[in-house]
Image (tube, helix red, strand yellow):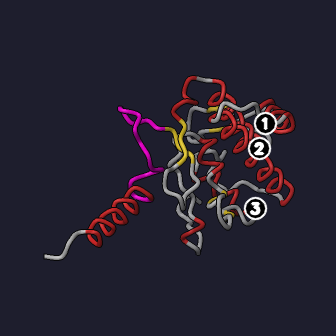
Amino acid sequence: MTGISPADPALAFPFIGGRPCLDFVATLGRRHATPLERLPDPAALARWFAEAGLAVDDEPARVTARELADARVLREALYRVVRGAMAGQRPEAADVELVNAAAARPDLAPQLGTQPWSARQPVRAALATVARDAVLLVRGPLLERVKKCENPDCSLLFLDDSQARRRRWCSMERCGNLAKVAGYRSRSRAAPAR
């Protein structure tokens, strides 16, 4: 399942957040413009679980339309809670309630052997694991290292794990190179002709 790619490359999941919860909120791209929904159907959510390493076994999770809708609602609550915490703001009570309820459910249980996880309800357990990751991130010391990509066309959040804590881009391969190319072109146009 992990080797299956979406037909549209824009729907590929960016796993560059450094935390499962940040990678999950990245399933909605271009938040500041026309949003790009990377979870258009239940199969896409099953693919995300597999690619994120949160699948119970080699078979794709059986995701219902209702579970997909619930996952999207949770994703947006997680995004608002993390962004609010980054800004030092108190999150909305409804978002806190939703995230806490998801985090309180049984999550994926790690297993020795061929299957990395066990769960009676794999979809709910994977979402509980993501919600718990967000709670731990927001309540812990790593929150101050969460940043939003400085590319104005990007809305991804990431954990700055660089030694100097000066990372500006979600990744050099995505936005960092775009910024370098744009800077080079700008300097080239501004340089006097010889």
User: Dots 1 and 3: beta carbons under 8 Å?
Assistant: no
Residue depicted at 81% across the width and 33% down the height: 96
Query: Residue 24, percent across and down?
Result: 64, 48
Q: Nearer the viewer, residue 51 or 94?
A: 94
161 on left or right of 109: left
Question: In this picture, is 100 found above or below 22?
Answer: above
Q: Nearer the viewer, residue 84 or 10?
A: 84
Q: Identify the residue under disc 3.
A: 42
Residue depicted at 66% across the width and 58% down the height: 31
Query: Residue 18, percent across and down?
Result: 51, 41
Question: Where the N terminus falls, by quadrant?
Answer: bottom right
Question: In this picture, is 128 found above or below 24?
Answer: above
Q: Three-letter amino acid code at disc 3?
A: Pro
Q: Identify the residue under disc 1.
A: 99
Q: Three-letter amino acid code at disc 2?
A: Ala
Query: Residue 3, percent across and down?
Result: 53, 62
Specify the segment rendered in magenta: 160-174
Question: In this picture, is 169 found above or below 164?
Answer: below
Label 3 element class? helix
Q: Nearer the viewer, residue 73 or 145?
A: 145
Q: Identify the residue under disc 2.
A: 77
Per the image, is 164 magenta?
A: yes
**Marks 1 and 3: which is nearer the front?**
1
